[in-house]
Amino acid sequence: MRIFAAALATETNTFSPIVIDRRAFEASLCAGPGEHPETPTLCTAPITVGRRVCAERGWELVEGTAAWADPAGLIARGAYEGLRDEILGQLAAAGPVDAVMLGLHGAMVAQGYMDPEGDLLDRVRALVGPDVPVFAGLDPHSHLTARRVAAADVLVAFKEFPHTDFVDRAEDLWRILVDRLAGRVRPVMSVFDCRMIDVFPTSREPMRGFVDRMMRMEREVPGLLSLSVIHGFMAGDVPEMGTKVIAVTDGDPVLGARVAEELGRELFANRGRHLMPAMGPEEAVARAKVAARGPVVIADMWDNPGGGTAGDATVLLHEVLAQGVTGAAVGTIWDPVAVQLCFAAGEGAEIPLRFGAKSAPETGDPVDAVVRVEALNPAAEMRFGDSVVPFGAAARVSFRGVQVILNTVRAQGFDPSLFSALGLDPRAQRVLVIKSTNHFHAAFAPIASEVLYCSAGRPYPNDPATTPYRHVRRDIWPICADPFAETA
């Protein structure tokens, strides 16, 4: 067997001013054929898992390009078309293959392309013909378009949010593909449209129990191969944005349709109850200030670079300073110019520095302070599950009893190694402020005395009922109170 595998992934916040070009992929991951590192990124696990699966079976894995860019705004047309055509050219050069395995995200939007993944899958299908299996992994914060469903045989999304299971879901993809190539199964997909926009953290109920039941059904229901919930990505203004359920069955679309609808209607019945309760910055900082012990983790949940924002908002930091909190550490504030100035000054230097709040309205005001440059790291990295996430040249500065990590490659706070990479022990801090919606939870909760979710400013379009969408359908909750009733 000869299997072609490649990856092309990012998440597009269509309201973000930060354009993704080829350099953005190169800053995060842009590996040529055979050059992907042993550790996967979020969306490239189908390649690393595929190496092991194919080696065990004596199959040939033909690797194409693997490219991942940290979330931001629209992908420049030339960047998308260049990477797409690179992968398609590699597939064509590979000659006849027995299957195609792709690592995608699912929420890409490029200049001139509302559905880049649909475009890529269509072109892959045209190259390999109707009978070659085309499988792909997805992030659940994606857009499941009819075009993608028509072009692919199997789509499997991560189940967990935080996405701690991206390697496990790649294992699922390969398990189904192995069985398909052996003739043991005939996978078919069924999709149910939940007609809603919501956020579904699996670190709390009701989504925790829902995902546990999905995995139990996969084990126990005969003929059911895979279940995925596409959460949707509410910062992506595209026509088919929204929550959907995928059921993959062994040649039984009736079973798939029934199960997908059952699960989808349960999600709709719980609409509005999934998201973590959030508080304003004044309350969050006040609660952290009086905590009996630390560290209290405050998640700046809507200035999340993982959702395409810049990650340079200062609203929470200003509140920390206003309330006189000491022993606080903030990670990170994206400011490449400030980092450059810190590197020029060197460790131990005291310099006047302005940083933060450059990217967009409602992100606060820049911080002006005389800071001490405590630590510099020319290539800082943190852990995220089985992967390593770069956040670029970074500096740790201190002033008024507060430590701030400034970085050059935008990345959300996944893991306490974010702080230790700059020589700071996160467990020794009273307060940790991180920029993440929920991916931080798996790694930070074990060290936190308390976890607080904070809605500070509005760098991210976090209220779909009022977000000024131009392309999103109108018959979807919460834009529409009950879309099922109105279409009955």
Image (cartoon, helix red, strand yellow):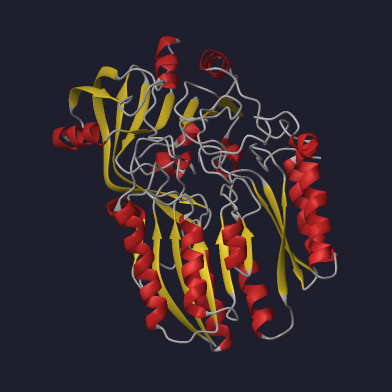
Residue 342 visible? The answer is yes
- Provide residue 469's location: percent of width, then percent of height: 52, 32
- Provide residue 53's location: percent of width, then percent of height: 57, 78
Compared across the picture, whether 271 is left or right of 289 comes to: right
Quadrant for the C terminus, please.
top right
Badge count: 0
Residue 347 visible? The answer is no
- Provide residue 168's location: percent of width, then percent of height: 62, 62
Going by the picture, which residue comes out furthest to the left?
Answer: 344
Is residue 413 placed above or below 33 in the rendered structure?
above
Residue drawn where x is 25% and y is 37% of the image: 336
Compared across the picture, whether 178 is left or right of 12 comes to: right
Compared across the picture, whether 294 is left or right of 389 comes to: right
Residue in front for this viewpoint, 323 or 256: 256
Residue in front for this viewpoint, 154 or 325: 154
Residue in front for this viewpoint, 224 or 300: 224
Quadrant for the N terminus, please.
bottom right
Residue drawn where x is 49% and y is 58% of the image: 117
Is residue 273 placed above or below 455 in the rendered structure?
below
- Provide residue 17's location: percent of width, then percent of height: 35, 35
Residue drawn where x is 52% and y is 75% of the image: 100
Q: Which quadrant of the structure image shows residue 370?
A: top left
